[in-house]
Image (cartoon, helix red, strand yellow):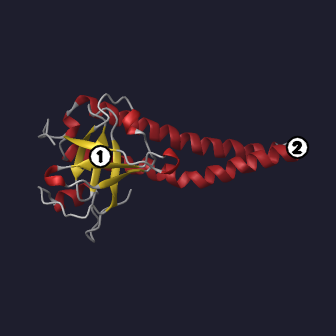
Amino acid sequence: MTLPMTKTAWDHPPTAFGYRRLAMRRVVWLIGTVALGAVSCTAISYAPAPLALIAFMSIVVTGLAILPAVAIAFFRRQRVAAVLRAYPWLECLCRYPAQAAGNPTTIVVAFQNGYAPTFRIVPFPVALAETQNSHPDRIWFAGDPRFGGVVSPVGGHYPVRVVPHAPAGREWDGPGDVALARRVGLVRRSGKGTQT
């Protein structure tokens, strides 16, 4: 693990640009899901054949099923921005455990003193090792290792939210500020980490 590169991750220009791209993706997903559902609902009344009616109904049902996840992702993007504005980037070693069906949902980040928790990439899995990443064995991390934060391939250009997946077996003994983690939304008032 190396020392912080800037005062906060947000001070790094590619990070701010990467967050704006993330926010735009979330807006497009939300608008697209709502628009697809609205068009399908309108088309149901004009469906000339039973087969078309079935197709439009399946689109509506699918859209209603994914709308909550897309809406949560849209509103939780602000938590990513809060973490980036509060914490510096740390460059750490990482590895991507093999998952069933090749689903890139977890990442193991190695911090100081051998602490290497497993994090889940939320709300949608992203193959960070393949996303414009010239150093797949390293990751930039901003946040509190106990409660999660934001990771990006080296360069800070693709920030995504991570939450703890499973206990690492050993408690973090490095620096940390629970009040700051609570302020940016990494910790609930109960003291438990947030999962979105």
Residue 49: numbered disc: 2
Label 1: which residue? 150
Please state which of residues 64 and 115 is positioned toward the viewer in this rendering.
115
User: Residue 61 appears at what percent x and percent y?
Assistant: 68, 53
Q: Residues within 10 Å of mark 2 (few under 14, many from 20)?
A: few
Mark 2 is on which residue type?
Ala
User: Residue 162 appears at what percent x and percent y?
Assistant: 34, 50
Disc 2 to disc 1: CB gap under 8 Å: no
Q: Secondary structure at mark 1?
A: strand
User: Residue 26 appears at what percent x and percent y?
Assistant: 46, 41
Q: Is residue 130 left or right of residue 86?
A: right
Residue 174: numbered disc: none
User: How far apart in space, not on screen, are marks 2 and 1 (Cα)?
Assistant: 49 Å
Q: Residue at x 69, y 47 (%)?
A: 59
Q: Residue furthest front?
A: 98
Q: How many marks?
A: 2
Q: Residue at x 17, y 61 (%)?
A: 179
The answer to which image quadrant residue 167 occupies is: bottom left
Mark 1 is on which residue type?
Val
Q: Residues within 10 Å of mark 1 (few under 14, many from 20)?
A: many
Q: Quadrant of the N terminus?
A: top left
Q: Is residue 48 left or right of residue 74?
A: right
Q: Residue furthest right?
A: 49
Q: Residue at x 46, y 47 (%)?
A: 124
Q: Secondary structure at mark 2?
A: loop
User: Residue 112 appears at what percent x and percent y?
Assistant: 14, 50
Q: Quadrant of the C terminus?
A: bottom left
Q: Is residue 100 left or right of residue 187?
A: right
In the displayed structure, 186 sits above or below 28; it is below
Q: Nearer the viewer, mark 2 or mark 1?
A: 1
